[in-house]
Image (cartoon, rainbow, N blue to C red):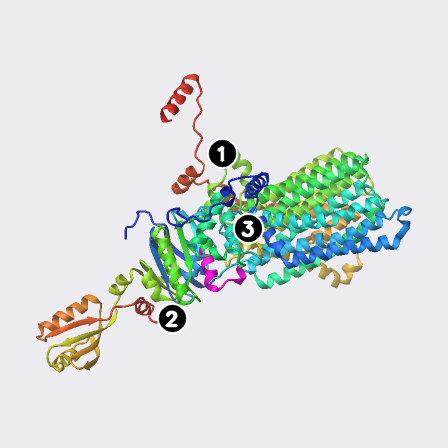
Amino acid sequence: MSAEAIPQSAAPRATQSTTPGWFARFLVRAEQLIDHVNPILVKETRQALKSRQFVATFLVVLLACWGVSFAVVAIIGPDVYYVASGPTMLMVYATILACPLILIVPFFAFRSLAAEQEDNTYELLSITSLSANQIISGKLGSAAVQMMIYLCGVSPCIAFTYLLRGVDIPTIVFLLIYFVFLCLGLSMLGLLAGTNAKARHTHVLISLLVVLCLVIVLSSTITSIPEFVERGFVDLQDPWFWLSNFAALTFYGATFSLLHAAAAAQIGFTSDNRSTPLRKRMLLLHACFLGWISIGSFFGPRSPEFFLLVLLTAAASSAAYWYLMGALMTSEWPHLSRRVLRSLPSTTLGRMFLTWFNPGPQTGFMFAVSSLSAVTLAGLMLILFFPPVGNWPSRDTVFYFLLLSWCYTLLFLGIGKLLIGLIRTVTYVQLSAGFLVHLILLLLACGIPQVIFLMTPSLRLGSDFSFIQTTNPIWTLVTLIDNGPLAVEANTLLIILGPAALVVLLLNIRSLIVDVHHMPRALPERVAQDEALLHPPPEPKPINPWEAEASSASSEVKA
Amino acid sequence: MIHARQPLIELLHLHRYFGKTRAVDDISFEVYPGEVFGYIGPNGAGKTTSMRILATLDEPTYGDARVDGFSVVDDPDRVRRRLGFMPDYFGTYENVNVREYLDFFARAYGLRGTERTRAVGSVMDFTLLNTLAEKPINGLSKGMKQRLCLGRTMIHDPSVLILDEPAAGLDPRARIELREMIDRIAQLGKAVLISSHILTELGELCDRVAIIEQGRLLATGSVEEISSHAEVVSRVSMRCLDDPQPLVNWLKARADISDITLDGNRVACTHEGGQENQAILLREVIQAGFQILEFSSKTKSLEDVFLHVTKGKVQ
């Protein structure tokens, strides 16, 4: 608003103060600090503190804690000096705290985003300068603030359990830390669910699913609290305790980051490059998983069986993970927006290594396949160093599992992608619809042979595996793990599936060539002008004493 | 009005399809700084869809739209910094008062410190919401909410304002106040694109209008330009010095004249043709020897123009 046109009556009050005492200075400083806080966090904290729902829930939690405290002290009476009642009380307080932290705060996070879409405020928010990441972070921050308020409310009671003896400080601290991480993780999931609750009917369905999931998590948490408190899970002297916690933390961080990026991508502008950040995080999560599983196998028992078991677990998890991620990536919209084209890698090296991070189903397919191929190849090379062992799992089992799981993943992703491409020639296919195509394909491939198998007595009463089950990856691979390569005639399967996978790969590579040939576009002139205004290039620094003298002289003249 | 060289709003062959429905079908126009541009059309004509595309809330199927030279498809972030959009709904939060609401949007638009406080104060002054600063939004009347929403739209001092049905449901006083505010905004050099059903008000407020129907642009220009260019039917009245009956007979013989009425020595008739044809008619009447004291035709209101251009297909 132009200063001349509109009266400026509302000047900042803080600056009008003539005698700024320490409190006024503190307020000004606090105001300056809050300026850097996410606006959504500020708004939602204001709203929450005025909300009857929040105040009522907080009071209920507080009253429950006080009530339990008074009741227990009254019941125990003078025995409080002789009986170590700390663990029991900690379990009760943890159960009370679990209700808001696992049920209410994550559901509030879900509702806060879903309600924005319901009340038509989301569109107003989305056209501000806030990025999708900031919106998600703000909502998450608001959930974190609520969580902290609940924690602060219950913390005196939890401290009281230490005075009652029988429970040590590390147990209390780690219990609270796990609660905090669980609450934040569930809130993140709630937000991701909230981004999908766009239409009214999906909103109701997703709300029910969210509540159901939260209730399941709450009940399982409540049932595991006694075990955690009584069995002394926390052992600070044990290096495995720290290692496992660190592994869990990094894995949590990578997953959290992926979920955050996914939620931001859901609400981001469609012409934005929403895929590359997701792919980077997918890779990070997988690297994290492989890294920790490698460290685990290094510190674990020194036996080939254990190593092969670890390898089998890694191969199975990687195949499932890249199938899931590949199904999402191959459902992406195939056309790159002009905005994305501007940000494509321009150098030869960049184009060589970063093209797979570009949005689109073709690059997504290759990204998933090449990531899984790297794992498969590494697994195969590692196996060569091990002697054949007869025990379960055998070297041959892992060898065939690696190859067959690679073939299946490639086949299902490739055929699914081709099918989506075909449907796209007729109608628009959303990402969720594309994912559904993959899912239906997998269900049909597993379901049809299974139905034939169950309805044919000769097959059912015969051996465990039949070639009818060739299209059923779950049955085939589980039989392979359970009964070994001979049970599934792995050689024959490999002769069938290997060439089929290569054909599908070649069919998909055709369309990939188009994506590889995309060249980065130059910034439009108007954008370049704006960019220069927003981020002016730094003034060149003098590189010798004469230039320094000249620049100081010119600045003096200007002055 | 002086047009700067660079338009602030450009719609370039904008298309938006929803399945087989063509909500917006090849619309192009430009709006310049300091201009109030009216966007009129019946319900479902495609006004809101094209405004939503301009506000970066939707994407065109084909074509593009630019705000201050930036594409709404390629650079929505740059467009959003320059644009204020007031949709046809309020979009208010619970447990938030007027000052907090404006403060939130000021923060969301990246205003910090004194700049933010000043912007909130200025907007409250401008929209006359100063006395209601601490009042919860849910307790505001419709007119006050509308003013608040206009304030929110202007909080980051955008160069372009898009107002979708801003006067809907307002009482006459609130409408007048809103009209005055929009007038003042245009005087600040901002481009205002406004859609409304209250055509009489738009006619007074807008420098130019665009009329759309079924997603297609039917006419663009000032109300006078559109009415003069359109093949219109107008009511012409003539006062004769002597007996009007010969004039009536003369008029009856003409193909472009119908529905003749006689009131004393005043003859009124319906004439098919624009203003140029009216001038020809007057010349021919005088050349035919009739003594005419007065010749007038009813000036077309925006409503008449709209009804004529849209063929009266208002839904």
Tag shown at residue A332: 3
Task: Give the number of the mark in front: 1 or 2.
Answer: 2
Kindly report the distance in space between the C-alpha atoms of the residues bearing marks 3 and 2: 41 Å
At horizontal 65% and vertical 42% (from top left) the residue drawn is: A254
Does label 1 lie on the same chain as label 3?
Answer: yes
Tag shown at residue B69: none
- The subunit letter for the residue under badge 3 reads A
Q: Quadrant of residue A524?
A: top left
Q: Earlier in the sequence, mark 3 or mark 1?
A: 3
Is B42 or B151 nearer to us in this picture?
B151
Q: Amino acid at mark 1?
A: Thr
Is A173 or A364 nearer to us in this picture?
A173
Q: Are marks 3 and 2 in contact (CB under 8 Å)?
A: no
Looking at the rendering, the stretch of residues picked out in magenta corresponds to B137-150
At horizontal 90% and vertical 50% (from top left) the residue drawn is: A78
Determine whether, in the image, residue A24 is placed left or right of residue B51: right
Residue A326 percent across, percent down from the top left:
61, 48
Q: Which residue is mark 2?
A: B314
Q: Which residue is mark 1?
A: A347
Q: Amino acid at mark 2?
A: Val
- The subunit letter for the residue under badge 2 reads B
| The C terminus of chain A lies in quadrant | top left
Q: Is residue B148 magenta?
A: yes
Up/down of A110 relative to B288, above or below: above
Q: Are marks 1 and 2 in contact (CB under 8 Å)?
A: no
